[in-house]
Amino acid sequence: MYTLRHGRKIERNVDDLDGVIQRCLQGEQSGYDALYDEYAAGIYRLCYSLLLNREDAEDVAQDSFVYAFKNLRRFDAQRSSFKTWLYTIAICRCRNMYRRARPTLIDLAQLLLPGPKTETPEAALAQQSAQEAVERALRGLNPRLREAVVLRYGHGLTYREIAEVMGCPQKTAESRVRLAHDALRGALQAQGQGLLEELVLWG
Amino acid sequence: MGISCRECRVLLPGYIQRDLTPKQRERVSRHLNTCSECYAAYEEQRVIVRELAINLPRIGSDHAPLDQIRAAVMAEIAQPKPPRRTARLQARYSVAVLVLMVMLLLPWTFRSYAAEPPPTQPRPENATPSATVMVVASATEAANTLTATLQSNYAPISGATDTP
């Protein structure tokens, strides 16, 4: 499983990242594989959290990587980290996707396929319902607020990084996260404390 | 100096996420100790933040088709880019064709203008004004008189003939 720790590890060691990018620029497949392994899970999760649709998330994640890999020469390490550059590419594509405003389709695979295996059915149920509640709450959010809250809590970006990815001042990023809090309060309050306690109990 | 409830609510997400400066943090803590309403809001937000922090990273992680996406990405980047030279040549040829078309069309356009007869003044039929008739009649009369006068004064030189 890919965690944020992985992402940070490669970012901290700039020499490694530079080396990987250099390998890519020389046309070495291993370089592309290394970058993909490092960021693919995060980018897919970001796309899915923003679009809330598997097909769209898959398309956008693929398109983002293709664009990034083909335009790797344009990446400037002095201006931003590779992660925020990649996230910016993905967010732009997600925004294009919202504009197309595809009607939401019922995801049959999600309905029919069993979820991930957890220790007990109760824990799985609690986790599933908590996750669904968050997804529902995200669906009702304005896209800009959704982006801010997903980047903050789903990907652990700092406000400075959120501002960089969303192309807005840091204060705006902060206020978007706060507004998302306010909007989510109503949506999540129904599940609220009980659900969280349930999660902590079973998780 | 203390902070207002409004200021405290603005700073709460940062306080929960430990994003504030030590000074800001201290001010929020002091306010929370004295204001029960803000403390209730803090408790509520803490639950939301925890819930988001637990669930948001999970969304989309259980069904990510990463291998499938990898295959598609690698296949796409393996395709050679079309050489830029071709694109430039295409652009040049397009401009040349456009200029050629304009050059061919221009004479045809001018010719069609030239072939068209110039506009003439409309001439009404049987429109002979009486004044014109009078002028013509008087002019004819004057000419006849003049011819008669000239003929009467005509005296050819003796021996002169019409033959050379």
Image (cartoon, coloured by chain):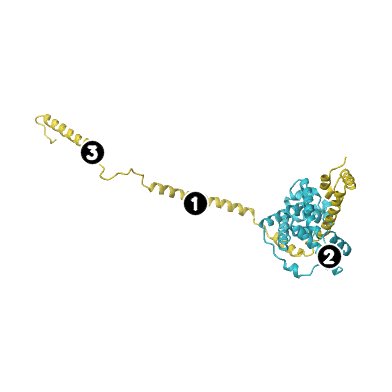
CA–CA distance between discs 1 and 2? 72 Å
Q: Tell me, what hue is chain A?
A: cyan
* Circle 1 SS class: helix
* x and y, in percent, of residue A2 in the image: 82, 60
Q: Tell me which numbered mark, 1 or 3, is placed earlier along the sequence.
A: 1
Instruction: Please check whether the numbered discs 2 and 3 fall on a single chain.
Output: no
Looking at numbered disc 3 in the image, what kind of residue is underneath it? Ser
Count how many numbered circles sit on residues in the image: 3
Mark 1 vs mark 3: same chain? yes
Q: Amino acid at mark 1?
A: Met
Q: Is residue B116 left or right of residue B75?
A: left
Q: Are marks 1 and 3 in contact (CB under 8 Å)?
A: no
Label 2 vs label 3: CA separation? 114 Å
Residue B130 - label: 3
- Residue A37: image quadrant is bottom right
Residue located at (39% from left, 46% from top): B114
Quadrant housing residue A86: bottom right
Q: In terms of depth relative to the viewer, which is nearer, B102 or A57?
A: A57
x 79%, y 52%: residue: A182
Query: Please, what secondary structure does the residue beneath circle 3 have?
Result: helix
In this image, A101 relative to A124: left or right? left
The label shown at residue A126 is 2
Chain B drawn in what color? Answer: yellow
The one nearer the camera, A203 or A74, is A203
Q: Residue furthest left?
A: B158
Query: Residue B101: which disc?
Result: 1
